[in-house]
């Protein structure tokens, strides 16, 4: 049987991760978070002092990263999620992900992870356009910049830093949308859902309904 693949793309704070996790659970398939692979390369580059503009060196770091349903491994060792979710790593991930050399390596690994499974919900920025162009269902989540910043602040208990979070997101989104290699755009056949004002449950229900129709 062909693997059932769902692609969920969207900008930071659009609710991708929460939606992808819940949808995967409801469908009984694995959730693959491709952002973690870019964050893992960013963490390695910060630790090893690799310059964020050294594409070939970053691609070599990417060769040490593997993706599965539980997150990422580097050199075979599981990387704790907390280490990947710091603001420093997020900012570095946004910069390193502009390099096509590194993207080529990570995209291969992401496809291998999806192929090894009976089905998966894969989330990221270029899943519907580049990584899994044949996905049975493609969803692109959006939300207003204010709402996305509010969600991220609440998620990370940093409500006092709302302005700083909004600004950091704006910088990351602009870079993701304007880069030449796999920019953040909805695939032509993606279902775009504006999640502003919708609860997590409402979005999950909508995506699960779309998945049932596509299966
Ligand atoms: O989704 P997350 O915030 O963890 O992603 C971190 C960064 O990795 C994003 O800001 C984006 O620049 C990059 N990314 C990407 N392509 C993906 C997933 C993430 O360029 N498929």
Image (spheres, helix red, strand yellow):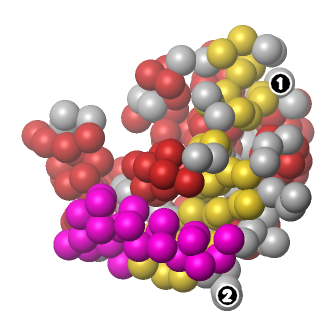
- Could you tell me which residue is drawn at 74 percent across and 60 percent down? 4
- Where does label 1 land, which residue? 64
Residue 188 numbered mark, or none: 2
Q: Indicate the position of residue 108 as horizontal and vertical percent values.
A: 88, 47
Instruction: Mark 1 and ligand 1: say if the CB distance to the nearest ligand atom is below 8 Å.
Output: no
- Could you tell me which residue is drawn at 65 percent across and 76 percent down? 214
Q: Indicate the position of residue 24 as horizontal and vertical percent values.
A: 55, 50
Instruction: Measure how far apart labels 2 and 1 are at the Cα level.
Output: 33 Å
Q: Please tell me how crowded label 1 is: few (under 14), some (14-19), or many (20+) other residues with Cα within 10 Å.
A: some
Q: Is residue 39 left or right of residue 3?
A: left
Q: Is residue 18 left or right of residue 212?
A: left
Q: Is residue 165 left or right of residue 112?
A: left
Q: Indicate the position of residue 124 as horizontal and vertical percent values.
A: 60, 56
Q: Would you place residue 24 above or below residue 190 in this image?
A: above
- Could you tell me which residue is drawn at 13 percent across and 42 percent down? 159
Which span is picked out in magenta? Answer: 194-215
* Quarter of image, res 50: top right
Q: Would you place residue 165 above or below residue 89 in this image?
A: below
Among all residues in the image, which is located at the extreme bottom?
A: 188
Say what secondary structure mark 1 lies in: loop
């Amino acid at each position: 049987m062909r693997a059932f693949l769902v692609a969920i793309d969207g900008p930071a704070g659009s609710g991708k991760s929460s939606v992808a996790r819940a949808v995967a659970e409801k469908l009984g398939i694995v959730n693959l978070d491709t952002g973690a692979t870019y964050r893992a390369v960013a963490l390695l580059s910060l630790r090893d002092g690799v310059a964020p503009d050294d594409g070939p060196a970053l691609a070599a770091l990417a060769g040490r990263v593997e993706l599965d349903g539980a997150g990422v491994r580097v050199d075979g060792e599981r990387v704790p999620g907390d280490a990947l979710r710091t603001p420093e790593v997020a900012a570095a991930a946004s910069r390193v992900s502009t390099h096509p050399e590194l993207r080529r390596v990570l995209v291969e690994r992401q496809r291998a992870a999806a192929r090894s499974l009976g089905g998966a919900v894969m989330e990221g920025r270029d899943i519907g356009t580049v990584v899994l162009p044949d996905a049975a269902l493609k969803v692109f989540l959006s939300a207003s910049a204010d709402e996305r910043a509010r969600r991220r602040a609440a998620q990370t208990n940093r409500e006092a830093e709302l302005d700083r979070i909004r600004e950091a997101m704006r910088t990351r989104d602009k870079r993701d949308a304007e880069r030449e290699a796999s920019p953040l755009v909805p695939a032509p056949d993606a279902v775009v859902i504006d999640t502003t004002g919708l609860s997590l449950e409402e979005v999950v229900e909508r995506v699960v309904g779309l998945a049932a129709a596509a299966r």
